[in-house]
Amino acid sequence: MGTFKLNQEIVIVTVISQKGLSCNLIGRKKAFTINQEAGSLTLTWLENQAAELARKVLASGLFKIVNLHNPVRPDERVEVMVEPYFPPCELIILGGGHIAQPLAAAGRLLGYHVTVFDDRPEFVSFEHVPAADRGVSSSFDYIEEYLDFGPRSSVVIVTRGHMHDLECLQKVIKHPVAYIGMVGSSRKVDMIKKDLLVQGFEPKLIDSVYMPVGLDIGAQTPEEIAVSIAAELVKVRRGGMGLSLKYASLPKEKRLNTGEMPKAADQDILRKAVKAACDNVPAAMATIVKSKGSTPRKAGARMLVYSDGRICGTIGGGYGEHEVRMQAINVMNDYLPSFYKVSMDADIAAGDGMICGGAIEVFIEPVSVYAGIFYGGESFELCRAVGSN
């Protein structure tokens, strides 16, 4: 047990509905990291199953709604929301030249935290790459001293010369990153592969590098090359084929489904919710748990609502969002979580700019429930389960 920091990879399991239990668990939370837990779900069977779910979501990053039951008493059931709260993935661009500018903008658009590294200070300045979150200038010899390369890092090597590219690749390829791409002609790529083989790198590891970088879309300009690289990043993350959709034949169910990539905006919503809980500021978190039909946002989308009507994030705007905001005020006043369903007929949908109607189910909870996870206190009484463990 303990308290968490928001820069950790965290999975939060929340009870959103129940049947057959002798106590009310709705709204109760437990959070998990790779080696730590905080909060309580009270029931032993539920705790064990939640821990197993959390391990899977820590690996996949996929938002889930799951039905669980007591194996000894199958009539005791709960529905849980399993939410990944991961730090944003990072796009590291090694080389601040003409490709770095549009690539940084594309990376920001895809939700990456963007870092640009170059040995020329003027090439990592805000004026040169305004879309970058961070600019670092030093010799390419020292990239490992300034940058952290890990499983949430995607690295694109676009320096101004062959030797710098090889130097960077020799360092980065040793780390377990999500993606490595390097610019270069076929001749340059062949030379670098031979150099790496001579240095003792495994052929399989060398082949894991995307070089030449990007998808074949006939890109010529720096902006087109950046789009090509960004498309390959999405392809690798989502398991697509890289074909025009007109010709793509792989069934959707065969493609990787890794869920929404956690974005900086999502982390900001959670930070604001935790801060509100710590400061005793009335607010409620609304999370879409189910969607059907044509809805702007799907399961996992979040919105934070304050008592004065301000919001952070969105669950799609329009009529549905307005209804949920009104319901959130009630949740703040009652300090009790609530399920709210919004059905949109064709007329309402058309007014909101949607092609057809849809429906969403939203779980709304007071932010005070986050206090126990992040600050070590309990925000509501533990319930006693009679004969249910």
Image: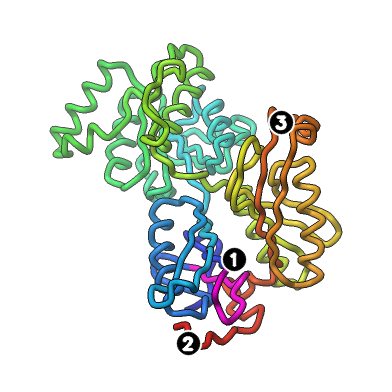
Q: Is residue 18 visible?
A: yes
How much space separates mark 1 and mark 2, taking CA atoms?
20 Å
Residue that label 1 marks: 17
Residue type, label 3: Met
Direction right: furthest residue = 308
Vertical relation: 272 (above or below) 128 = below
How much space separates mark 3 and mark 1, taking CA atoms?
30 Å
| Cβ atoms at labels 3 and 2 below 8 Å apart | no
Where is residue 277? Give x, y as percent: 70, 70
Q: Is residue 272 visible?
A: no
Is 273 situated left or right of 211 in this image? right
In terms of depth relative to the viewer, which is nearer, 316 or 252?
252
Secondary structure of residue under mark 1: strand
Which tag is nearer the camera, tag 3 or tag 1? Answer: 1
Residue type, label 1: Ser
- Image: magenta residue range: 18-31
Is 281 situated left or right of 268 in this image? right
